[in-house]
């Protein structure tokens, strides 16, 4: 096991495994990137693999945590694909102040806000939350007309289950403590 600092300032920990034969993988553990390598990998190759895995993690995180501009573009694309382009947000941005909601929307000014807690979740979950908020630009409540707007998104139920799972885990499994809008996760 060795530790070093990456060019981005993150701590990098290399863990060698006798069971690992040919594969290299990496993941974040807090502020540390853990790179798993075969025990017999030469140190020159180790350094090359560390750089490669840091680049891959960075690209993966960029895809999972788009900028506000990228979020706005993504929302416009989702509106075109699933809502006939009818939902036209004026702004779409990440916010840090939503501890119990995944997203919110103000139909009067066309603003959509996504909780920073979503950073790092799969893109199809972020797409669902964006689509949920876009639907609120057209239908403010959670009535049947609202849910009809979301029927075209093929991963609606899966994304709702994913978000409910996060709520369950973060609420330490306490039933009834998650802020939910029946029949789905609290968005707005």
Image: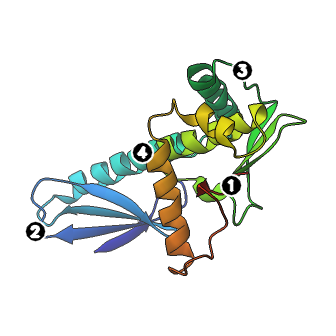
The residue lying furthest to the front in this view is 144
Q: Which dot, 1 or 2, sits closer to the camera?
A: 1
- Image quarter of the N terminus: bottom left
The CA distance from mark 3 to mark 2 is: 54 Å
Provide the residue designation for mark 1. Answer: 115
Q: Is residue 20 left or right of residue 170?
A: left
Residue 151 placed where, x, y %?
53, 34
- Checking the image for residue 86, the label placed there is 3
Residue 54 placed where, x, y %?
41, 51
Which numbered disc flags the more N-terminal residue, 4 or 3? 4
The CA distance from mark 1 to mark 2 is: 40 Å
Which numbered disc flags the more N-terminal residue, 1 or 2? 2
The residue lying furthest to the right in this view is 108
Which numbered disc flags the more N-terminal residue, 3 or 2? 2
Dot 2 surroundings within 10 Å: few (below 14), some, or many (20 or more)? few
Which numbered disc flags the more N-terminal residue, 4 or 1? 4
Which numbered disc flags the more N-terminal residue, 3 or 1? 3
The CA distance from mark 2 to mark 4 is: 25 Å
Q: Secondary structure at mark 4?
A: helix
Provide the residue designation for mark 4. Answer: 55
Q: Which dot, 3 or 2, sits closer to the camera?
A: 3
Dot 4 surroundings within 10 Å: few (below 14), some, or many (20 or more)? few
Write down the quadrant of residue 17 in the picture.
bottom left
Provide the residue designation for mark 2. Answer: 19
- Residue at horizontal 60%, vertical 34%? 148
The CA distance from mark 4 to mark 3 is: 38 Å
Q: Looking at this view, is 61 or 39 the one in front?
A: 61
């Amino acid at each position: 096991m060795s530790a070093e600092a990456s060019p981005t300032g993150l701590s990098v920990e290399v863990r060698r495994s006798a069971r690992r034969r040919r594969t290299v993988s990496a993941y974040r553990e807090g502020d540390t990137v853990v790179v798993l390598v075969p025990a017999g990998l030469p140190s020159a190759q180790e350094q090359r693999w560390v750089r490669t895995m840091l680049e891959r993690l960075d690209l993966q995180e960029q895809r999972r945590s788009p900028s506000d501009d990228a979020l706005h573009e993504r929302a416009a694309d989702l509106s075109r694909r699933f809502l006939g382009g009818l939902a036209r947000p004026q702004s779409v941005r990440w916010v840090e102040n939503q501890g119990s909601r995944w997203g919110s929307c103000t139909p009067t000014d066309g603003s959509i806000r996504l909780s920073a807690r979503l950073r790092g979740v799969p893109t199809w979950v972020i797409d669902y939350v964006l689509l949920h908020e876009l639907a609120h630009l057209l239908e403010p409540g959670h009535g049947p007309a609202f849910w009809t707007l979301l029927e075209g998104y093929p991963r609606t139920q899966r994304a709702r289950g994913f978000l409910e799972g996060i709520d369950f885990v973060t609420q330490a499994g306490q039933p009834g403590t998650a802020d939910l809008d029946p029949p789905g996760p609290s968005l707005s």
